[in-house]
Amino acid sequence: MINFLQLAHFYVRKILSRGGVAIDATVGNGNDTLFLAKTVGEVGLVYGFDIQEQAIQVTKERLENEGQAKQVQLFLYPHQQPWSMVLPKSLKGNIDAVMFNLGYLPHGDQSIITKPVSTISACQQALAWLKPRGLVTIMLYTGHEGGEEEAEKVLAWSRQLSADRYSVVLHQRLNRTHAPMLVVINKLDDKKPSQKKS
Ligand code: SAM
């Protein structure tokens, strides 16, 4: 069975290639950061945010061990804060892909979780920094306290995005309770609004 993390990578690979620019908005143990770094190669750029020193350290070591650190910059910085404070402003509107993997740090402090208001604020920034045809992936978990509420709020926010500007897809396993969900948001090309049904 393809899990949703692999599915998120599948989508990102369709958009992101060697020399591209990507953001991991929730670095955690670095699985997605490493994947993004390998995808863009040493000529690309990856930026990562996390609020836990442990996540930044573990990921830094992992990237170094894999020879993938050169193209990655990690920030101990909350993703809801202005990205323009840490990222080159020239990248606004030029990011290929942004990945979110919500919830708590696996093998870490499970009381430190992503929260609905800050998550949505970060997702809004992600859309603003994305290039046309760029992609945002959001992995949602409902098994932990606060997860259900966060998932509901993120889904409600995703649903109200303009259909002319974004394609929004939800992957959800229907025959398992508390299964993760994957939201994939594709920014549409400005010149080509989606066709409306007559
Ligand atoms: N993508 C990661 C991986 O591949 O290992 C897993 C991410 S983990 C599920 C969620 C991470 O989000 C945690 O490391 C947590 O510290 C981080 N986080 C929580 N709130 C945050 C915030 N406001 N800004 C940035 N990161 C945050």
Image (spheres, helix red, strand yellow):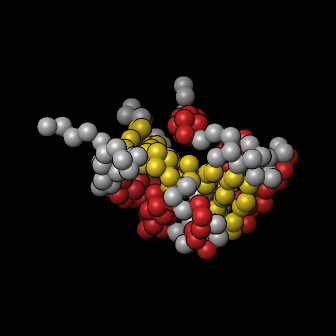
What residue sits 79% from the left and 56% below the top? Answer: 60
Quarter of the rendering containing residue 157: bottom left
**Image position, residue 137 (x, y; %):** 50, 47
User: Which residue is at the far front?
Assistant: 191
Quarter of the rendering containing residue 39: top right
User: Which residue is at the far top?
Assistant: 1
Q: Eyeballing the image, is 7 above or below 138?
A: above
Q: Is residue 48 left or right of residue 123?
A: right
Quarter of the rendering containing residue 58: bottom right
**Image position, residue 152 (x, y; %):** 36, 55
- The count of marks equals 0
Q: Is residue 136 left or right of residue 166?
A: right
Where's the C terminus, which quadrant? top left
Towards the viewer: 133 or 30: 133
**Image position, residue 197 (x, y; %):** 18, 37
Residue 133 visible in the current orientation? yes
Q: Is residue 110 left or right of residue 93?
A: right
Residue 144 visible in the current orientation? no
Towards the viewer: 179 or 28: 28
Where's the N terminus, which quadrant? top right
Q: Eyeballing the image, is 55 above or below 167?
A: below
What residue sits 46% from the left and 45% below the top? Answer: 133
Towards the viewer: 197 or 38: 197
Q: Eyeballing the image, is 179 above or below 150?
A: above
What residue sits 38% from the left and 41% below the top? Answer: 169
User: Which residue is at the far left?
Assistant: 198
